[in-house]
Image (cartoon, grey):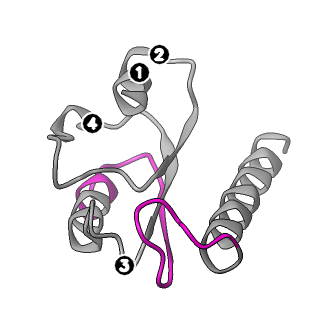
């Protein structure tokens, strides 16, 4: 739903998608994707397999004018169950990305 809203709101200049279910839904509506963003998933995700997420990232990266950053949390499942090993690294990755993007827009 969040990615569909991205397509309807031109004022949105970026997105973060955590564990998108690329194997369950058709994300072709993101062509062309209007903004750059971060996609993050776990390498042990059995709900949304990493290969499907990587395929989605590859399709988005083919588009001109946007940058898609893809990060993976080693050993994490779909819900990043282990706080210390999975949830905290995922949150740190998101925070780093947001800080970097905010720094870019303030220049």
Q: How many marks?
A: 4
Query: Which residue is denoted by mark 1 in the rendering?
Result: 5
Picture quarter with the N terminus:
top left
- Mark 2 near mark 1, Cβ–Cβ under 8 Å? yes
Expressed as whole percent of the image width and height from the top left, the position of residue 36 reads: 50, 46
Tell me whether circle 1 and circle 3 mark residues in contact (CB < 8 Å).
Answer: no
Counting other residues with Cα less than 10 Å from the Cα at mark 2, is it few (<14), some (14-19), or many (20 or more)? few
Question: Does 102 sit above or below residue 83?
Answer: above
Residue 14 covered by magenta stretch: no
Q: Secondary structure at mark 4?
A: helix
At x 64%, y 80%, the residue is 85
* Residue 81: quarter of image: bottom right
Which of marks 3 and 1 precedes in the sequence? 1
The dot on residue 9 is 2
Relative to 31, 83 lies left or right: right
Point out residue 51 in the picture as x, y percentages from the top left corner: 22, 73
Q: State the residue position of label 3.
A: 44
Q: Which mark is residue 30?
A: 4
Tell which tag, 2 or 3, sits nearer the viewer. 3
Secondary element under disc 2, as helix, strand or loop, is loop
């Amino acid at each position: 739903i969040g990615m569909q809203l991205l397509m309807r709101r031109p004022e949105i200049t970026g997105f973060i998608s955590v564990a998108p279910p690329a194997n369950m839904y058709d994300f072709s509506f993101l062509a062309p994707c209007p903004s750059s963003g971060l996609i993050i998933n776990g390498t042990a995700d059995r709900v949304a397999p990493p290969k499907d997420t990587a395929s989605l990232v590859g399709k988005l990266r083919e588009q001109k004018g946007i940058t898609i950053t893809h990060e993976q949390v080693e050993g994490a499942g779909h819900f990043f169950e282990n706080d210390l090993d999975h949830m905290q690294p995922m949150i740190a990755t998101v925070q780093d990305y947001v800080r970097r993007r905010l720094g870019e827009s303030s220049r």
